[in-house]
């Protein structure tokens, strides 16, 4: 067996409480099975998600990141997701500019009603990250430059 | 041992350095990127920069790296496994291309870290480091080594000192056993020589008269008002400290998680506003005035009081690196005059 | 765990082991976090030192029984343990309550809520978009299952609203915006210019008679009747004051006419009246904006509304109504003749995923039975046929009612879907399948076709939801906070739902929910202060000379959806300003944390979701 | 006396300024910041092509603040940064007088409108070296860009000259100096350096006025300003907001538009 | 054998935790290796670097007496990253300790003399080590007086020991709290430490005064002692500069020509007078 086949990525999901977290609950109450590779962190709102937490997760060994919250106009706090979206545009741009692989950081709007979408988003993410293989570009930075 | 003399050509010097890398010893030498020159691990001697002036960053990282793992730890059930790194092999390294001021600085730095409770890391590295220096044929307006206890042809701290003596040729002084050991392998590349007067090939360094007696003057100048104006344009960055061959302030920080990680030592600078900040919010050195004073006092008053020499070898790097043109030569002259003026009856 | 024995186990563990934090590894915190936090509080532990690890909805229910699932479960618990170690005790925030309620929408739900709140002794501001309150119920003829007259039971309530000392009624008005927070809202209301001085107007109706423009389809009559440009929507309107439809009025369109003004004995016509903006402080909001039905044009298979004799159920209500355009006689729109064959199509649009309306509109089965029954009463020699998918008549007396229609009034029920309605030789033909006869195709000629068309959200419902900061579902119906346990609350504290704006409902259900919403409001108003969740943002304070890591850039201010960021000046002994910092108004902050992620110097933190807590979770995951 | 010296003298004489922060002759043919407090000392002031450092950085320094009302010799980049500082409530426009200098002309700017007009008339100029690097970066693959930054940032020893030279790095406590939690590794290893510069770039998004001070301050010769500039330019490109042009501009990053790009969101 | 690595801590386990005051805790630490316990010794006044792996090191004095062997104690206030993490630890947790570092209170020189301790707030721990040391060798010293004050009754540390000291006949304990910090049951004095010291008026003859407290207390206590006739050589204190390495290298605690960690932390008032006031 090759490592590609056995590689199970660890994915950290940063989700808002009102839409995606509730949506993921709905996936559960609907008993829709999906890949178990994802670890969900609950935030009140996507607006609260600090890009540094994403960075830390990648540095610590996350193979992929999934950031998800309410669809535009559906934010429980009305505009948190809009603010988040703008921040992510810039964050992605800077990651790209510094040469990091953007395919490891995924974004999705998943509403409280989209239990099935949550399962699908997780499955797609896991599949794609599994194809990319283990993330090393962040973790290897720990060692570089230390005597 | 007594000094051994020899001569070798530039061509053979390169061959010798190539031989060092081929022989498995790590070679560190200046390498140029853009306008800046850094000591770097060299695998191809053609990459070595033979710039006449001191490098941008000093060679101190060879003894005292920017980041160094002091220990690593990993949770092991109920206890903690800690690796103290004593078993780590500190490989023999050859440092080529230091200027005499750098070599003096390396020696002083090693002395500092050995004082009192010895620092194993610096000590071991110093033991394993072979320093091949190049005498200075050129000095710039920021140099003042001759007034700071060194000189363009000073062999202190070097194992081998090379002086370019015209025509792609170097006069070589082998100053230590370590130097001789390294050379032994490359017997064919150099010729025996005799003591020669190299002074004609050495740079003329503008003296800094203010430095004489400066330490004594500083001792009484802590409360002087000269510091405020002198430090006004200082931005409070650490550029001067980080390029300095003798600045040795550091920080100790843990990285990782409580289950697995390392304790790291990293460079720090007394010029940073948070360097002395207490958790209570109290800061004994609240503004750049006090921090600049500390830098100058530490180098020219406290260090001499403790170690008999200044914490400065006059290499001029800080003056070249400063984004606000805090020129150390000029500062010393100005402070000296200012203090003298204030203490005049 | 959520049962009493489970909770008691936690409580005794807290006491026996002197616990400083609790992680309950069970279901979703969205389900039982309050339950367990309460249990902790009862055992003397600050409730905010309790966290829930979601092992059910997000782990055991979605993953198979494997090692990987167990690993995930361990990770989930471990992360929450790392978090709870960094939780701080938090204490509820007290905020004053303005004991006036805003009710938006004056249909039966709004009327009921307003009356209940007002009768409990609290002030109510009722805002209605139309010129009169009454809503859809005022358009109905009789109501199922008792067949009592809708107007007869509604009108007294409408009058009571108008006369109630605790109710301020604003008709022909809309809520422009809602700011503030539970207990302390400010509603901005636009009272559209009625072009009438309501105080002077006596409601005599001279102006309506005088108006030369009379051929405007009447909204009240669902387009089947006509009205004038200055009009009272219906005779029992409350308030019984006319309004000028400026879009249709000759004076407003062409600058000439003013007949009404000359005829008005009270000199109450005000052509220069402006919209009035009112800012009203309220402590709670009941949203009861109702629903609408899809028009016949929604149905291409039934002729896109081209056939005049294909009408909606609501239009049929008007044909049946004694106050309707035909004064209660069933006459079809095309030629005014009494239809002898009426075909009723249930589930017109509803339960039809292809049309984007998967849900059941809930009221159609009953009103279709009522329509067929009433038709049979009014046209005893007519034939009534109902195409249906299945009959949903759950409710007190409902199934009996439908049975009466079938058995006593001989309404013909055909189980099957209608595929087309088309015209053949000047006559409408309804083509469908009878599924009880094995899908046999049937064609029935009809003089009138009545569509029990789907109940949908009001146009503009989404926009209103956004203005009120309440969430809404995929069909633009407003979302309740919990489908079972908090059916009248919204996710925005202090805003409640009543009636069909949440989902299609019949009258008794709407009234029931309206009373429930009212009781929530009255409960909220029972104290002068209300306690709020302390999950809010806070700007740090440090020792001088920094005072805070906040540098006062106020990037947080533009990030805050609730205008909760204020500025605070730190002053020295002699009053000079040493530093200007951001400050979070704890009453306005709703705890989204958007400001927190923007703050470069991390001076703002969100209690309950602090930097330390979130960071520790990430680090723990890989420890 | 140059026009600059004359104007500075007048400001000091009239009491409109108690200190003029300008450029003076330094060592080795360089210029340096000078603080002129008396009319006699205005002869120290120079302005020419060597004067590129953004002097508005000194406005945040408490020692300078204590000197009283300041007049500042400002390059177009410094004017933009001053506007940005005003927009971010860091500088009270009434407390500073600007001597905007560009080539030969010196313009006295005393109110926000004048600053804005000046900034509008003096668009951002990108030094040719920066332009060349930017262009070559644009042609690189992600891996090549990673390698480029890895090599460049390997020289960074975290002296924070970039931060110290930046007028907009005025935070009371920089994120890199925080340890509860430790957002940015203290160590200047590859990770710590990347974290620091990525954070600085993100913090400069919509704020960097592209004055170039950080790049010139870097003792290691890293084209470090490119990161902040890129962050700011992406905000400009995506959301149409350019830093340093309006004194009442809302923060570009903590604003939003309903139709901001979201093609990357599933 | 000790590692050649200067920065290598002894592994230690938390044996007991005592909550002293709001945010203030005392840990009793025991060596995990017997060899370390046997090798280890220290003297009153010394300090160490206490570390939590993954969080870092923090500098505290050794608060227990060198006369009590086999364990050490430290008392700390939860404030920064490391102390906050320490506060999350439980009995049984593994910590690191390196030390002892720094100079000592020259107790042997003070045999036969009166000892006056003046402490404020969270600065009692360094003196507690000396107090117990003196009490354990009680017959070698003459009168022992402890004056201890805190902002409020709740802020007093070592409450159980204060009770014991208060009842001992071979020493005198005076406790005080700042005005407003007293409770209904408070039996001690109310007033700031320097003021109480003034009324206490201990004689300077054959007496050494050890003063530890917040900077403001120190600032007002030294003049009171001088007024009472104490010379600068009779007054001792400890400095609490920020430290990282503990061995005179990292540069943080440098004050004038001394490194507080190496040349201190114990200084006589006389020595202090010759240093720049950068502490």
Image (tube, coloured by chain):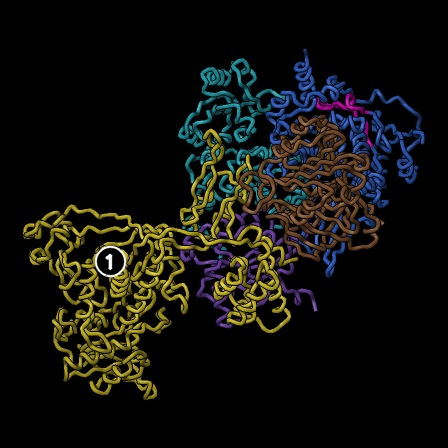
Closer-to-camera residue (B49/C460)? C460
Above or below, B230 relative to E56:
above
Closer-to-camera residue (D165/C508)? C508
Does the magenta segment cover residue C489?
no
Residue C394's spot in the image, x, y percent?
Answer: 32, 79
Residue for badge 1: C128
Residue B276's spot in the image, x, y percent?
Answer: 65, 36
Residue furthest front in the image: E169
Chain where mark 1 sits: C
At a point 35% along the width and 70% down the height, the residue shown is C357
User: Which color is chain D depicted in?
Assistant: cyan
User: Which color is chain A depicted in?
Assistant: purple
Q: Which residues are magenta?
A: B133-152
Q: Which chain is blue?
A: B
Q: Quadrant of residue E203?
A: top right
At a point 73% along the width and 60% down the height, the residue shown is B78
Does the magenta segment cover residue B142?
yes
User: Which color is chain C depicted in?
Assistant: yellow
């Amino acid at each position: 067996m090759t490592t590609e086949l056995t590689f199970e990525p660890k994915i950290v999901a940063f989700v808002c409480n009102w839409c995606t977290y509730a949506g993921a609950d709905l996936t559960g109450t609907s008993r829709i099975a999906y890949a178990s590779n994802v670890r969900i962190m609950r935030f009140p709102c996507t607006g609260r998600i600090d890009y540094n937490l994403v960075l830390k997760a990648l540095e610590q060994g996350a193979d992929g990141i999934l950031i998800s919250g309410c669809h535009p106009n559906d934010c429980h706090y009305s505009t948190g997701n809009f603010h988040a979206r703008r921040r992510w545009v810039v964050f992605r741009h800077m990651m790209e500019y510094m040469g990091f692989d953007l395919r490891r950081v995924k974004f999705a709007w998943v509403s409280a009603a989209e239990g099935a979408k949550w399962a699908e988003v997780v499955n797609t993410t896991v599949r794609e990250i599994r194809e990319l293989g283990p993330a090393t570009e962040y973790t290897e930075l720990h060692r570089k430059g230390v005597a | 041992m007594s000094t051994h003399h020899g001569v070798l050509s530039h061509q053979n010097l390169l061959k010798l350095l190539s031989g060092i890398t081929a022989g498995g010893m790590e070679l560190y030498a200046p390498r140029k990127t853009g306008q800046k020159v850094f000591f770097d691990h060299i695998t191809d001697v053609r990459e070595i920069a033979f710039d006449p002036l001191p490098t941008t960053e000093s060679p101190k990282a060879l003894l005292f790296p920017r980041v160094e793992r002091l220990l690593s730890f990993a949770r092991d059930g109920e206890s903690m496994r800690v690796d103290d790194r004593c078993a780590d092999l500190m490989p023999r390294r050859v440092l080529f291309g230091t200027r005499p001021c750098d070599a003096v600085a390396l020696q002083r730095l090693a002395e500092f870290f050995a004082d009192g409770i010895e620092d194993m890391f610096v000590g071991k590295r110093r033991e394993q480091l072979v320093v091949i220096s190049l005498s200075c044929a050129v000095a710039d307006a920021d140099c003042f080594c001759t007034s700071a206890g060194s000189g363009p042809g000073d062999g202190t701290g070097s194992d081998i000192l090379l002086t370019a003596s015209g025509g792609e040729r170097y006069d070589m002084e082998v100053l230590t056993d370590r130097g001789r050991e390294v050379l032994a392998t490359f017997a064919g590349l150099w010729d025996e020589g005799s003591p020669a007067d190299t002074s004609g090939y050495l740079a003329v360094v503008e003296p800094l008269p203010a430095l004489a007696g400066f330490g004594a003057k500083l001792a009484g100048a802590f409360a002087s008002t000269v510091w405020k104006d002198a430090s006004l344009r200082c931005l409070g960055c650490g550029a001067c400290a980080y390029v300095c061959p003798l600045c040795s302030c550091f920080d100790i920080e843990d990285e990782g998680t409580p289950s697995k990680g390392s304790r790291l030592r990293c460079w720090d600078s007394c010029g940073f506003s948070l360097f002395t900040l207490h958790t209570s919010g109290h800061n004994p050195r609240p503004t750049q005035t006090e921090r600049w004073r500390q830098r100058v006092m530490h180098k020219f008053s406290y260090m001499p009081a403790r170690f008999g020499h200044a914490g400065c070898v006059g290499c001029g790097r800080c003056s070249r690196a400063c984004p606000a043109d805090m020129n150390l030569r000029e500062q010393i002259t100005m402070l000296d005059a200012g203090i003298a003026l204030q203490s005049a009856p | 765990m959520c049962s009493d024995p489970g909770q008691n186990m936690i409580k005794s563990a807290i006491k026996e082991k002197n616990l400083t934090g609790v992680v309950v590894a069970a279901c979703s915190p969205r389900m039982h976090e309050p339950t367990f936090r309460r249990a902790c509080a009862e055992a003397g532990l600050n409730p905010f030192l309790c966290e829930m690890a979601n092992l059910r909805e997000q782990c055991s229910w979605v993953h198979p029984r494997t090692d990987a699932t167990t690993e995930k479960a361990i990770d989930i618990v471990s992360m929450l343990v790392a978090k709870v170690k960094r939780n701080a005790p938090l204490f509820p925030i007290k905020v004053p309550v303005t004991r006036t309620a805003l009710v938006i929408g004056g249909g039966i739900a709004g009327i009921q809520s307003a009356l209940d709140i007002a009768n409990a002794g609290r002030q109510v501001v009722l805002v209605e978009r139309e010129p009169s309150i009454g809503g859809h119920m005022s358009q109905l003829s009789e109501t199922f299952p008792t067949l009592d007259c809708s107007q007869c039971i509604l009108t007294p309530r409408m009058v009571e609203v108008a006369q109630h000392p605790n109710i301020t009624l604003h008709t022909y008005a809309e809520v422009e915006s809602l700011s503030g927070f539970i207990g302390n809202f400010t509603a901005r209301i636009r009272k559209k210019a009625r072009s009438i001085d309501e105080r002077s107007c006596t409601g005599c109706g001279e102006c309506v008679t005088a108006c030369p423009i009379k051929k405007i389809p009447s909204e009240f009559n669902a387009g089947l009747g006509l009205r004038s440009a200055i009009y009272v929507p219906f005779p029992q309107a409350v308030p019984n004051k006319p309004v000028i439809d400026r879009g249709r009025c000759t004076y407003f369109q062409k600058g000439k006419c003013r007949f009404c003004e000359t005829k008005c004995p009270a000199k109450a016509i005000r052509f220069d009246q402006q919209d009035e903006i009112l800012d009203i402080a309220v402590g709670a909001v009941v949203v009861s904006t109702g629903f609408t039905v899809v028009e016949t044009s929604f149905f291409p298979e039934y002729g896109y509304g081209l056939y005049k004799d294909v009408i909606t159920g609501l239009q049929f209500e008007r044909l049946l109504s004694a106050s309707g355009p035909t004064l209660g006689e069933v006459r079809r729109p095309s030629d005014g003749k009494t239809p002898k064959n009426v075909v009723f199509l249930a589930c017109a649009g509803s339960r039809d995923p292809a049309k984007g309306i998967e849900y059941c509109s809930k009221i159609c089965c009953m009103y279709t039975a009522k329509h067929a029954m009433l038709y049979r009463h009014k046209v005893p020699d007519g034939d009534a046929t109902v195409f249906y998918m299945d009959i949903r008549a759950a409710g007190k007396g409902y199934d009996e009612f439908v049975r009466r229609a079938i058995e006593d009034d001989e309404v013909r029920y055909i189980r099957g879907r209608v595929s087309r309605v088309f015209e053949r030789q000047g006559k409408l033909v309804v083509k469908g399948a009878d599924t009880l006869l094995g899908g046999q195709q049937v064609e029935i000629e009809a003089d009138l076709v009545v569509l029990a068309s789907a109940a949908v959200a009001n146009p503009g419902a989404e926009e209103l939801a956004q203005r009120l900061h309440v969430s809404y579902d995929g069909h633009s119906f407003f979302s309740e906070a919990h489908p079972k346990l908090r059916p009248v609350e919204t996710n925005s504290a202090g805003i409640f739902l009543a009636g069909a704006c949440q989902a299609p409902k019949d009258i008794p259900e709407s009234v029931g929910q309206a009373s429930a919403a009212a009781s929530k409001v009255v409960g909220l108003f029972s104290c002068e202060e209300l306690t709020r969740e302390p999950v809010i943002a806070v700007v740090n304070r440090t020792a001088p000379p920094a005072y805070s890591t906040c540098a006062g850039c106020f990037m947080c201010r533009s990030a805050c959806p609730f205008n909760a960021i204020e500025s605070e000046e730190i002053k020295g002994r002699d009053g000079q300003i040493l530093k200007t910092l951001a400050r979070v108004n704890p009453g306005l902050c709703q705890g989204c944390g958007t400001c927190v992620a923007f703050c470069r110097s991390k001076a703002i933190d969100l209690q309950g979701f602090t930097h330390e807590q979130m960071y520790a979770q990430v680090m723990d995951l890989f420890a | 006396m140059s026009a600059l010296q004359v104007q500075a003298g007048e400001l000091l004489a009239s009491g409109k300024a108690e200190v003029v922060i300008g450029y003076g002759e330094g060592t080795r043919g360089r210029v340096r910041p000078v603080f002129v407090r008396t009319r006699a000392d205005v002869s120290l002031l120079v302005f020419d092509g060597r004067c590129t450092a953004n002097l508005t950085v000194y406005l945040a320094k408490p020692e300078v603040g204590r000197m009283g009302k300041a007049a500042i010799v400002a390059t177009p980049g410094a004017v933009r940064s001053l506007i940005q500082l005003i927009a971010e409530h860091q500088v009270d426009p009434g407390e500073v007088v600007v001597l905007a200098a560009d080539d030969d002309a010196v313009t006295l700017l005393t109110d926000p409108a004048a600053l804005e007009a000046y900034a509008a008339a003096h668009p951002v100029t990108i030094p040719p070296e920066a332009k060349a690097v930017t262009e070559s970066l644009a042609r690189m693959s992600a891996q090549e860009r990673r390698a480029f930054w890895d090599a460049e940032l390997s020289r960074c020893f975290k002296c924070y000259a970039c931060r110290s030279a930046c007028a907009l790095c005025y935070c009371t406590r920089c994120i890199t100096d925080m340890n509860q939690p430790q957002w940015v590794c203290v160590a200047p290893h590859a990770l710590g350096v990347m974290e620091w510069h990525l954070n600085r770039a993100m913090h400069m998004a919509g704020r960097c006025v592209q004055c170039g001070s950080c790049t010139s301050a870097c003792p290691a010769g890293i084209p470090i300003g490119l990161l902040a500039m890129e962050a700011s330019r992406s905000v400009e490109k995506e959301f149409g907001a350019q830093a340093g042009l309006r004194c009442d501009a809302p923060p570009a990053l903590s604003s939003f538009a309903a139709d901001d790009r979201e093609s990357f969101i599933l | 054998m000790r590692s050649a690595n200067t920065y290598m801590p002894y592994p230690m386990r938390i044996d007991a935790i005592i909550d002293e005051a709001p945010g203030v805790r005392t840990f009793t630490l025991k060596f995990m290796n017997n060899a370390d316990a046997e090798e280890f010794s220290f003297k009153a006044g010394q300090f160490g670097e206490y570390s939590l792996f993954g969080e870092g090191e923090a500098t505290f004095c050794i608060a227990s007496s060198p006369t009590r062997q086999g364990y050490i104690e430290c008392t700390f206030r939860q404030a920064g990253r490391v102390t906050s993490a320490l506060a999350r630890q439980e009995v049984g947790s593994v910590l690191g300790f390196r030390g002892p570092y720094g100079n000592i209170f020259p107790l042997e020189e003070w045999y036969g003399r009166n000892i006056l301790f003046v402490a404020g707030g969270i600065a009692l721990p360094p003196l507690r080590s000396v107090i117990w040391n003196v009490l354990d060798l009680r017959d070698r010293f003459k009168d022992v007086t402890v004056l201890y004050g805190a902002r409020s009754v709740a802020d007093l540390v070592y409450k159980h020991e204060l009770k014991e000291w208060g009842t001992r006949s071979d020493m005198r304990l005076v406790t005080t709290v700042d005005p407003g910090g007293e409770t209904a049951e408070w039996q001690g004095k109310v007033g700031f430490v320097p003021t109480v010291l003034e009324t206490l008026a201990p004689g300077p003859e054959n007496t050494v005064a050890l003063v530890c407290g917040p900077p403001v207390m120190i600032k007002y206590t030294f003049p009171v002692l001088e007024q009472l006739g104490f010379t600068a050589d009779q007054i001792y204190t400890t400095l609490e500069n920020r430290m990282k390495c503990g061995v005179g290298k990292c540069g943080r605690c440098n004050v004038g020509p001394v490194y507080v960690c190496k040349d201190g932390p114990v200084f006589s008032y006389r020595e202090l007078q010759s240093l720049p006031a950068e502490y």
